[in-house]
Image (cartoon, grey):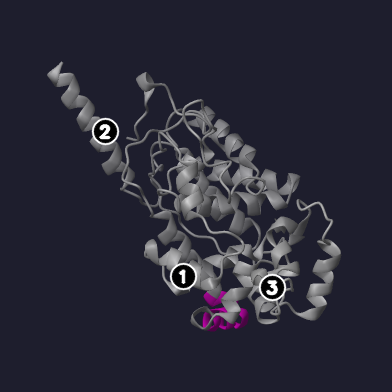
Amino acid sequence: MATISLLLIFLLHAATVISADLRPGFYHSTCPDAESIVRGVMRKALIREPRSVASVMRFQFHDCFVNGCDGSMLLDDTPTMLGEKLALSNINSLRSYEVIDEAKEELEKACPGVVSCADIVIMAARDAVALAGGPDWKVRLGRLDSLTASQEDSNNIMPSPRANASALVDLFRKFNLSIRDLVALSGSHSIGQARCFSIMFRLYNQSGSGKPDPAIEPGFREKLDKLCPLNVDQNVTGDLDATPCVFDNQYFKDLVAGRGFLNSDQTLFTFPKTRGYVELYSRDQSQFFKDFVNGMLKMGDLQSGHCGEVRKNCRVVNGHSDHLLLE
């Protein structure tokens, strides 16, 4: 019995250590087509629904900030666990989980029990950017999937669309991400849409004043008023920038012009510590791309240090008797 216990301790320790060994080409020998399989799934998702790739890209942010990049946000609720899908920042916001499911199904056919869901999120986020016309890069892989999720942790960590740049700077600092990282990674809003729910306070009661956000350019304010009147279905969506299907630096140009959709975006231009980077990226798309890739890699390295497994189904943990550790 003692031998079995020692072996179990060793294996659990190995899961933590191996999870920290992130490197490009991790699946070169165990599943050589892993990255091409994920990109193929993302390409089909883009054709089916262009908005889906932006949704999948955001999974990396919502997964990695909450106890590291471990696929925890993909877990469904259970009778004994409230997962992260219904957390305040995720409910009615995150979507396209089925794209990750599809990638996992294809990978299980090709290489059963090898590629973690956490790594699929990282690959898919990179592919979303590349397929939308943005930069491409080599991702570091080798993560394990968590055995649990925490709605409470997600609620406590993830920022609200009402957050201002100062609060975002403080949040990113906790993860050793710089102000430059913050602004560059905010450029993820170069693609996709957001709900009227996220901006109603900006339009009608900014800071409890009963007035709109004065930073909104008047012509853009008129457009938003038509999209999101007071009696609107707040699930109606609007574009995050003027080119929502193309990953480019238009997002930053819009912020300079006072046309940021979210409060958390527009304050990056009005806040002195972040304004310079917004101006830089609005002028220099290549620098934005370079810094965005660097930020995605740094964020992708965030880990909890907890033990994990390679899930067979990204929505549920494996049975206790068949945990599959990365080799």
Name the residue at 49% across, 60% down: 137
Badge 2, how many Cα within 10 Å: few under 14, some, many 20+?
Answer: some
Residue 298 seen in the figure:
yes
Tag of residue 169: 1
Looking at the image, residue 141 sits to the left or right of residue 134; the answer is left
Q: Considering the image in quadrants, where does the N terminus appear?
A: top left
User: At label 1, which amino acid type do we have?
Assistant: Val
Image position, residue 216 (x, y; %)? 72, 77
Q: Considering the image in quadrants, where does the C terminus appear?
A: top left
> Which residue is tagged 2?
12
Name the residue at 51% across, 49% down: 155
In the structure shown, which secondary structural element does the residue marked by tag 1 occupy?
helix
> Which residue is tagged 3?
209
Mark 2, mark 1: which one is toward the viewer?
Answer: 1
Mark 1, mark 3: which one is toward the viewer?
Answer: 3
Main SS class of the magenta portion in the image:
helix
Name the residue at 41% across, 21% down: 319
Image position, residue 172 (x, y; %)? 44, 65
Q: Give the magenta-colored segment's residue range.
A: 275-287
In magenta stretch: residue 302: no
User: At label 2, which amino acid type do we have?
Assistant: Leu
In the structure shown, which secondary structural element does the residue marked by tag 2 occupy?
helix
Badge 1, how many Cα within 10 Å: few under 14, some, many 20+?
Answer: many
Badge 3, how many Cα within 10 Å: few under 14, some, many 20+?
Answer: few
Looking at the image, residue 33 sits to the left or right of residue 178; the answer is right
Q: Nearer the viewer, residue 113 or 82?
A: 82
In the structure shown, which secondary structural element does the residue marked by tag 3 occupy?
loop
Spatial CA distance of label 2 from label 1 is: 35 Å
Looking at the image, residue 170 sits to the left or right of residue 250; the answer is left
**Which of pointers 1 and 3 lies earlier in the amino acid sequence?**
1
